[in-house]
Image: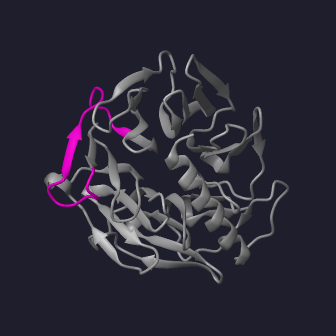
């Protein structure tokens, strides 16, 4: 296990306990698998969610950022990092949990200090105003390596916390949109693109294709744990796991699975997708019941599991 995995795991354990201690009221009782609907101040799509030292944050349509507090979810930002109302599609948190990074349409990139509430915009790096689908960060607050997945098939990256002039880019594949990115260590991680391809980097600059032949579905989510340990979620209810020797597929049904999170040990996980579908992993993927039918876009596991999606939907467990 990498030093980054260890530091992030310690942060997640500490922050999740703190969040769990502050019981947040929900709008509906939990169903048979423990998922409950939480009230939120928004009614438009939420696309990603993260745990931080200050609790959980979700990002979405119109540049909204909402925060989970002891009194429930509240809006902390509207309009995105530039104030132009660009949708926010992806987010990630620094290894110490103190900075929330998010990206979205028209080149939007923001760095939000969850402890002070200050916002720094890194939008339009290299004057690029394409849509950004996802972001991964490694390192601590103020010293992060930042990787942005572009709709034009490029990965934009900065090893200097997104400072002006520090950005560069690479096109790993054919130019198809990069849908998701995740890093397991400094300058090491995986991406998936719209050409049904998976790429790995060991230096943050060069990317090698590692699959996936004959998948026949689109890839939407990636959870990266090491060069020989990566999980992919995609269309048609498909999940794929690279174990260093082969890709192991799992077919959960027909829902498009938008996001996936699995533990470092690979003994538990969660995937979410269309129609309110969620599946839990313990040796195999098992369908869970949820009290909603809205499409789910992202999931964050912790002491409190959180899934977000269309119509401002937030599920908690």
Start-end of magenta stretch: 159-178
Q: Nearer the viewer, residue 61 or 50?
A: 50
Q: Is residue 142 above or below residue 265?
A: below
How many marks overall?
A: 0
Query: Which residue sits furthest front?
Result: 3
In which quadrant will I find the N terminus? top right
Residue drawn at x 33%, y 52% as measured from the top left:
146
Determine the main secondary structure of the stretch shown in magenta. loop
Residue 26 visible in the displayed image: no
Q: Is residue 205 above or below residue 13?
A: above
169 inside magenta stretch? yes
30 inside magenta stretch? no
Its colouring scheme is one colour
Q: Nearer the viewer, residue 208 or 311?
A: 208
Query: Which residue sits furthest right?
Result: 32
Q: Position of residue 132 (x, y in %)?
A: 32, 50
Residue drawn at x 55%, y 77% as measured from the top left:
41
Q: Is residue 153 left or right of residue 216?
A: left
Q: Nearer the viewer, residue 10 or 78?
A: 10
Q: Is residue 253 left or right of residue 119?
A: right
Residue drawn at x 51%, y 65% as measured from the top left:
58
In which quadrant will I find the C terminus? bottom right
Q: Is residue 138 left or right of residue 276?
A: left
Q: Position of residue 223 (x, y in %)?
A: 53, 40
Residue drawn at x 22%, y 41% as measured from the top left:
169
Q: Position of residue 296 (x, y in %)?
A: 59, 52
Residue 60 visible in the displayed image: yes
Q: Position of residue 236 (x, y in %)?
A: 59, 31
């Amino acid at each position: 296990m990498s030093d980054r995995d260890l530091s992030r795991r310690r942060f997640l354990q500490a922050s999740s306990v703190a969040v769990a201690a502050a019981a947040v009221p929900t709008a509906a009782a939990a169903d048979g698998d423990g998922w409950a609907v939480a009230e939120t101040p928004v009614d438009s799509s939420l696309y990603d969610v993260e745990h931080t030292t200050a609790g959980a944050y979700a990002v979405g349509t119109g540049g909204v950022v909402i925060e989970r507090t002891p009194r429930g979810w509240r809006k902390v930002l509207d309009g995105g990092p530039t104030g132009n109302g660009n949708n926010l599609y992806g987010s990630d948190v620094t290894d110490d949990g103190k900075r929330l990074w998010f990206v979205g349409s028209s080149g939007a990139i923001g760095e939000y200090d969850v402890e002070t509430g200050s916002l720094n915009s890194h939008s339009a790096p290299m004057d690029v105003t394409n849509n950004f689908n996802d972001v991964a960060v490694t390192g601590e607050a103020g010293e992060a390596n930042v990787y942005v997945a572009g709709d034009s098939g490029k990965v934009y990256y900065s090893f200097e916390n997104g400072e002006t002039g520090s950005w560069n880019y690479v096109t790993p594949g054919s130019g198809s949109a990069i849908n998701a990115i995740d890093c397991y260590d400094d300058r090491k991680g995986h991406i998936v693109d719209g050409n049904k391809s998976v790429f790995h980097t060991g230096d943050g600059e060069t990317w090698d294709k590692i699959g996936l032949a004959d998948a026949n579905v689109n890839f939407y989510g990636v959870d990266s744990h090491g060069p020989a340990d990566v999980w992919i979620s995609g269309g048609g209810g498909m999940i794929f796991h690279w174990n260093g020797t082969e890709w192991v597929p799992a077919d959960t049904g027909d829902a498009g699975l938008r996001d996936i999170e699995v533990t470092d040990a690979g003994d538990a996980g969660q995937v979410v997708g269309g129609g309110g579908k969620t599946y839990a992993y313990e040796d195999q993927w098992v369908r869970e019941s949820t009290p909603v039918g809205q499409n789910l876009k992202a999931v964050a596991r912790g002491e409190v599991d959180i899934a977000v999606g269309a119509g401002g939907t937030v599920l908690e467990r």
